[in-house]
Image: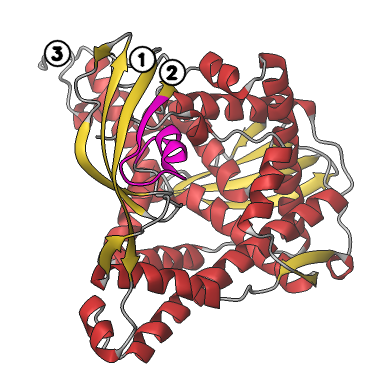
Amino acid sequence: MMKTTIERLDDTKLRLDVEVPEDVLKDAMQATLAYMGTQLNIPGFRPGKVPPQAVMARLGRDAVVDETIRVHLDDWYRAAVISSGVRPVAQPEIDMDEGDRADGLKFSATVEVAPKPKLPELSTLEVDKPNLPDTQKYVDQVLEATLRGAGELKDAGRPAEEGDEVVVDFNCTVDGETISGASATGYQARLGDGRLLAELEQAIVGQEAGATLDVPVVFPDDHPMPQLAGSDATFHLTVKQVQVVDLPELTDEVAKKVSEFPTAAALQDDIRGSITGRLEEEVAGIFRGNAVAALAKAADFVEPAALVQGRQQELYQGLKQQLEQAGLSIEQYLDRAGRDTDSLFAELEESARDDLRRELSLLALAEDASIEVSEEDLRREVAEHAEHTGQSPDDAMRQVLTSGRADLLRGELLIQRTIDHLVANVKPKAVDLPSPEEAAAQAAANNEVPVEDAVEEPVEG
């Protein structure tokens, strides 16, 4: 594992002193020797099949080391940059240490970076920290879902409402032709669970058993069923039953039936504890995000254009890949969102600036607070993850090292530790969490169209 130390030369220039240990150099030399063995012609060996020891004997260790440096120096430099959290804005000036190379290598990289953000005193930052919401309504919801397994279905005796169980027959036609694979008889679903198309659920609400409906549905061009892709279809639907679940009273006997717990009180305590834990994690996550946003907003600096453009392209490629996995093109996504390319790139530029402000502010804080991640810290983190997977800590660490993820993990730990320091020193301000309805309304006001919401659900049946 390489060791990197940083020295700030001035406001926009850093020097990274990097040590490439013997084991890393040895592995890189083996790769170099293997490649060179495919390129050399040495008498007594088949062309392209020269063994590493013969290459070393022919060229000498110094020549092999020089070639290894030529091939691997860029990778070593990038690894040092990732692990240290540095964000260069130009190519580095590399200076190799020409001393004894028997126990590894040393080199320094002088890099130009963005001007270091000027940060406020952390105690002056007032950061919204949500109050823990009332857990009882969540406990009731989970308890209801748990008891449904022991409940009995009965006719509702009224029009269907969201949350009711319905039994329906349906078939689908396009231009009068019945579509195979888009029909069902006696199909049972709970309204609001999304097992039926949204258009069908909306049409069923307010209908009584026996109602027959013709429901138009417009399918997108990329629908997975070719017979429906790009079509204006009609679902012919009959509501056979509208039912409600008659939930049993929660007793010790019922608790034993629907769970692993011996009493009703134990079941409720477990549900409450689980929900409270999740809500506490959610509140802590929101507080951490708010603290980072507050630090970035208060930091005094200008984001370098080169970094903004690079991050904008990263975001664009990430979105493109995500859409392709969902079966959409950029053009289809923009069409569904009612947007154009210019507005997308403007949004990505703003997101890139926000990302960089947060990242560069945290890196400046890490430097100011002398926060570092040692090899022992890295091993401890890997061991904690290994505990959850049943893998031995040594095997997990070996896997991290051989996969090249050590420097990336070190960089992630640096950011997390810096956020820990940040939230411990800002001034929390208690606020209430928005309700799901308020959060949805805010998202709609911001014209947010998540990728997953742009993908149509397949036909159920």
**Tag shown at residue 229:** 1
Q: Are marks 2 and 1 in contact (CB under 8 Å)?
A: yes
What residue sits 87% from the left and 52% below the top? 298
Q: Earlier in the sequence, mark 3 or mark 1?
A: 3
Tag 3: amino acid: Pro
C-alpha span from label 2 to label 1: 6 Å
Vertical side of 17 occupied by 280: above or below: below
Circle number at residue 220:
2
* Count of numbered circles in the view: 3
Q: Residue at x 40, y 63 (%)?
A: 382
Task: Identify residue type, mark 2.
Answer: Pro
Percent position of residue 388, x then y: 32, 67
Residue bearing mark 3: 43
Q: Quadrant of residue 15?
A: top right
Q: Assign a secondary structure to mark 2.
A: loop
> Where residue 250 appears, x then y in whole percent?
34, 84
The span picked out in magenta is 196-215
Q: Position of residue 174 (x, y in %)?
A: 32, 13
Kind of residue at badge 1:
Ala
